[in-house]
Image (tube, grey):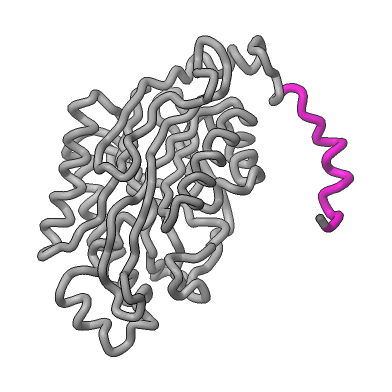
Amino acid sequence: MKVASSQYKVKALKSYAEFEQHIRQHMEQAVAQGAELLLLPEFFTIELMTLEHYKADCQADFDRIFEHWARTYTLPVKETCAALAKEYGIILAAGSTFAYHENEDRFYNTAYVFMPDGRIHTQNKIHPSYELVYNKHLTTPGKELSVFTSGETTIGVSVCYDSSFPEVARILCKQGADVILAPTACLDEWGRSRNILFSKARASENQIFVVNSHLIGSVPFPPNIPYGFTFTGQSGIYSPIQPLIGTPDGIVKQGEPNVEMVISADIQVDYLHSIRNKGHNSNRQDRRPEFYRQFEEQPV
């Protein structure tokens, strides 16, 4: 399976059509590289905050800026991404966005994955963190983890901070995940480095592939942060550290830091089951859950 990961540079927009065109440019690059799936980063929709009507609407009440963002754009973004997945014939894993779930009247940091056949997989972030500084109190933690399939490949999603918790990846792997998609938005080099480290660790300890997509660039809005948001990142595709399937450093492909681009790589999912049984490390087989279980309720 060939997968692509976006290093998506946010920019000021003059219209929603520009936002759609920005996604389309990344889709075209992924398709040109022969990818079957494109992953966008966490909060790639934040550039919608730069639209003039949006800024005007939020000036009087910018403490509720994320609520406005979610109520205004959740549905249009879903419709746009679903249409693009169908048009280009590949899976569009549309990073994540601050989303309003009308059926619950709640807000989540939600990753939507759009299939060319119209199916949509939804994964809410389990561990809200900074949520871009604003309105963490608005964000409902996700309540479940699930996987989806593409052909013979089983895929899960772990949104940004979720990747720092080994339990999240382990639960997805127990459901059969061969690949975990990790959309990310980092505000500094510390966050970027942590997320790369987490991606490598989750890939190696679970003997899976991890695809990590980073947001880059700057958004001058909102008004109560003097310099807006600046994101730093380096997207990557990571493998188990095993001969035949990976590399000694676990890096299959990485982007050039803070440069807008789409990277891609063939991931040899067929070999995963083989290396789990016959590889240098057989940590999936050698786990001792009965031993770990006795410590689960003890405080750390």
The residue under the point 53% across, 63% down is 129
In front of the other: 186 or 95: 186
Residue that appears at 27% across and 82% down? 58
Residue drawn at x 31%, y 64% as measured from the top left: 74
Q: Position of residue 180 (x, y in %)?
A: 49, 37
Residue 298 in the magenta stretch? The answer is yes
Q: Name the spot of residue 158 as percent of width and height, x first.
A: 51, 46
Q: Quadrant of the N terminus?
A: top left
Where residue 12 sits in the image (x, y, percent)? Answer: 18, 63
Frontmost residue, 246 versus 284: 246
The answer to whether residue 46 is left or right of residue 183 is: left
Residue under the point 25% across and 38% down: 261
Q: Is residue 54 left or right of residue 241?
A: left
Q: Which residues are magenta?
A: 285-299
| Relative side of 41 to 293, left or right | left
Farthest bottom residue?
60
Number of numbered discs visible in the structure rendering: 0
The C terminus - image quarter:
bottom right
The x, y position of residue 174, in whole percent, is 64, 35
Q: Is residue 300 above or below residue 137?
A: above
**Nearest the camera: 223 or 99?**
223
Query: From this viewpoint, is residue 81 visible?
Result: yes
Q: Is residue 238 magenta?
A: no
* Res 119 seen here: no
Residue 51 sits above or below residue 276 on the image = below
